[in-house]
Image (spheres, rainbow, N blue to C red):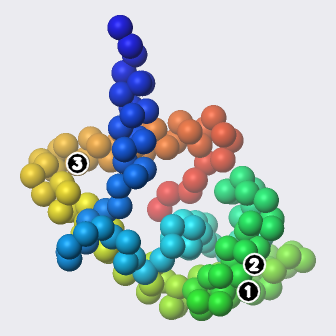
Amino acid sequence: MKRATHEVEYEQMLLSRHGLLTHRKGRRKDGLLERSAYVLLSRIRVQGPMSVGELSEAFDLDVSTLNRQTAAVMRAGFVERIPDPDGGMARKFRITEEGARTLDAEREGMVSSLERVMADWADEDISAFAGYLRRFNSDIERIGGRPWPRP
C-alpha cells in the first residue's frame, strides 16, 4: 500500500499548475503582480525594511536574482531604498504606499478567487485546510531553517 504522501505529491503538482479563477472568464493571469513581486512585497510588509542580503537569506536565492527582482519592483514604484533604520551600512528596501495598495488589491483578488473556489465549503473545513497548510509550510520552513514571519 502506498503512503498518502504519494497523493499529497500529486495533488500539490496539480495545485501548482492551477491559476486561481477570476470573476471573469478564465484564469487569474491578469493579476496585478508577478508571483515573485507578490511574495517579495509580502515578506517586506510583514518583516519591515530588508537589505538585499537579508532578502537573499530569507528566500535562499543568490544576490543577483534578488537584485533583478528588487530592481523590477523599484521601477514599478512598489519599494524604495532607504538608509538602514538601525544605523547599519546596507540600504534597505521598504514598501511604498503604491506597493502596499497594489499588494492589498492583489491579495483581495486572491481571496475573492479562493472564496469562489470554496463557496460550498463549511467554515470549519476552510479553517482546517488553512491549519494544515500552515503546518505544512511551517515544517518546510523548519527543515530549511528559514522560518517565514506571520502577521
- Extreme residue in the right direction: 89
Query: What is the x, y in percent for residue 40?
Result: 59, 69
Q: Residue at x 67, y 56 (%)?
A: 59
Q: Which mark is residue 81?
A: 1
**Discs 2, 1 touching: Cβ within 8 Å:** yes
Q: Is residue 25 above or below residue 4?
A: below
Q: Which mark is residue 12?
A: none
Residue linked to disc 2: 92
Is 136 situated left or right of 50 in this image?
Answer: left
Residue linked to disc 3: 126
Compare residues 90 and 86 and report the one nearer the observer: 90
**Discs 3, 2 touching: Cβ within 8 Å:** no
Q: Is residue 25 visible?
A: yes
**Discs 1, 3 touching: Cβ within 8 Å:** no
- The image quarter containing residue 86 is bottom right
Is 141 situated left or right of 6 in this image?
Answer: right
Give the SS element for disc 1: strand
The amino acid type of the residue labelled 3 equals Ile
Disc 3 or 2, which lies upstream in sequence?
2
Give the SS element for disc 2: strand
The amino acid type of the residue labelled 2 equals Lys
Query: What is the x, y in percent for residue 148?
Result: 58, 53
Disc 2 or 1, which lies upstream in sequence?
1
Disc 1 or 3, which lies upstream in sequence?
1
Q: Residue at x 37, y 48 (%)?
A: 15
- Extreme residue in the left direction: 120
Q: Residue at x 66, y 86 (%)?
A: 74
Mark 1 nearby-residue class (10 Å; few <14, some 14–19, many ≥20): some
Is 139 situated left or right of 49 in this image?
Answer: left
Q: Residue at x 69, y 57 (%)?
A: 58
